[in-house]
């Protein structure tokens, strides 16, 4: 069995940088990882990207806005740089690559209003390398009545074919999402709430650091259960899946007045408790949760997840997967599925009426 060499690109809600992955896949059972490269954003661009997200969330519908347009152009140029670096590191040349899956960056996610907005110029990226690009992977789902997220579950299922079922894969980026694979292979997936987004915001605002490295600040603090209960009282947590959420849906305001350590501990517990609440929505409760994304490096968050869910919590790296590369790999996988007309979203993952493909093709 042979597949297509595909590049996947992800700029996630943590706003830390671009993940670029090269895999070989047929978009079904064949997945072979070849290379991965993570390129960090510099602080100036990260701040402009955050401002673009804030402006987009304030808009009634996507439209022209000078700062967002400028950030989109800069974002695309950075993706060109990331692809060039990945190719150089992989030993492959442009002619080897069949397609690129380009997620872009979500500046606003409003399925409640019938739209989701990922910036990034797919045509420019295709033109830079002469490789077809599949972009705009979420809009068709939202237009059909879905949440537009999460999209990774079909890739999680491809990787998890040997795991005991029911199985669960939890992705911890700025926002957290869970994929549950039932004993019969049925997918249930949805956003659980925040992951690292609020913790990062807290550390930047009060700690002068971009994130809580290893969860060490939170680990020295005490959870304010009163503040945590107030945050968990948000009605969004009682909504049944499928559901998705924007990183800007919650703020650190409830923790203001706490010490640096206690605020970090409370916001970390908020992420963990949201996952515990999410397990109540699953048709089958998993005994183990396999964790991907940058949040798995936060030892305090991982310990809180285990304590508050009652499940065994493991990094996906223990399975031989690359937990840093997983999302980028997933968008390469979905680009191939899109080329082949295969579905990338399902009733149990985004709430669309029936399985459907998605993405817009940009040819060089």
Image (spheres, rainbow, N blue to C red):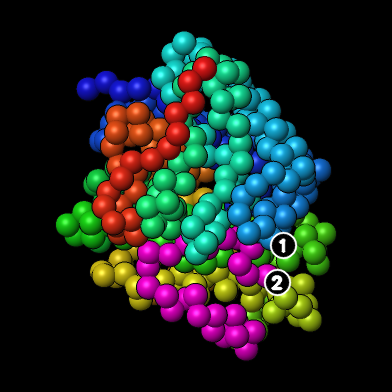
The residues tagged by marks 1 and 2 sit, at their Cα atoms, a distance apart of 7 Å
Compared across the picture, whether 322 is left or right of 125 comes to left
Compared across the picture, whether 260 is left or right of 137 comes to right
The 10 Å Cα crowd at callout 2, few under 14, some 14 to 19, many 20 or more, is some
Compared across the picture, whether 50 is left or right of 345 comes to right
Across the whole image, how many numbered discs are drawn on residues? 2
Residue 247, image x, y percentages: 60, 60
Residue found at x 44% / y 29%: 361
Residue found at x 21% / y 54%: 185
Please tell me whether residue 31 is drawn above or below residue 43 in the rendered image. above
Return the residue nearer the eye: 48 or 136: 136
Residue 291 seen in the current view: no
Q: Most extreme residue toward the left, as rendered?
A: 184
Magenta region: 226-252
Please tell me whether residue 275 is drawn above or below residue 336 in the rendered image. below
Q: Are the residues at dot 1 and dot 2 in contact (C-beta closer than 8 Å)? A: yes
Q: Is residue 247 magenta?
A: yes
Residue found at x 41% / y 19%: 98
The residue carrying mark 2 is: 252
The residue carrying mark 1 is: 201
Residue 300, image x, y percentages: 58, 66
């Amino acid at each position: 069995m042979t597949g297509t060499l595909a590049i996947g690109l992800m700029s996630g809600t943590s706003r830390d940088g671009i993940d670029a992955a090269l895999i070989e896949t047929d978009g079904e059972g064949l997945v072979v990882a070849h290379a991965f490269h993570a390129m960090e954003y510099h602080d100036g661009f990260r701040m402009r990207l955050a401002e673009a997200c804030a402006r987009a969330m304030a808009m009634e519908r996507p439209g022209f806005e000078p700062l967002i347009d400028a950030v989109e152009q800069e974002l695309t140029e950075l993706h060109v740089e990331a692809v060039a670096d990945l190719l150089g590191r992989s030993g492959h040349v442009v002619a080897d690559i069949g397609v690129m899956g380009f997620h872009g960056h979500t500046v606003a996610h409003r399925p409640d209003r019938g739209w989701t907005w990922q910036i990034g110029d797919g045509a420019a990226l295709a033109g830079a390398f002469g490789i077809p690009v599949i972009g705009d992977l979420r809009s068709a789902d939202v237009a059909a009545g879905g949440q537009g997220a999460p999209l990774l579950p079909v890739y999680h299922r491809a990787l998890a074919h040997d795991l005991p079922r029911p199985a669960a894969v939890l992705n911890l980026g700025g926002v957290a999402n869970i994929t549950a694979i039932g004993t019969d292979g049925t997918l249930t997936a949805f956003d659980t709430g925040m992951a690292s987004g609020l913790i990062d915001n807290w550390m930047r605002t009060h700690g002068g650091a971009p994130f809580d490295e290893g969860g060490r600040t939170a680990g020295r603090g005490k959870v304010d259960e009163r503040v945590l209960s107030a945050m968990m009282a948000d009605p969004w947590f009682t909504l049944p899946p499928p559901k998705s959420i924007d990183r800007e849906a919650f703020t650190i305001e409830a923790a203001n007045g706490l010490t640096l350590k206690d605020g970090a501990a409370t916001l970390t517990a908020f992420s963990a408790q949201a996952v515990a609440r999410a397990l109540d929505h699953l048709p089958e409760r998993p005994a183990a949760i396999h964790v991907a994304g940058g949040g798995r490096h936060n030892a305090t968050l991982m310990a809180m997840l285990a304590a508050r869910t009652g499940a065994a919590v493991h990094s996906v790296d223990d399975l031989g997967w690359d937990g840093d590369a997983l999302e980028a790999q997933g968008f390469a996988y979905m680009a191939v599925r899109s080329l082949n007309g295969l579905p990338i979203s399902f009733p149990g993952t985004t709430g669309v009426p029936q399985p459907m493909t998605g993405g817009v093709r940009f040819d060089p």
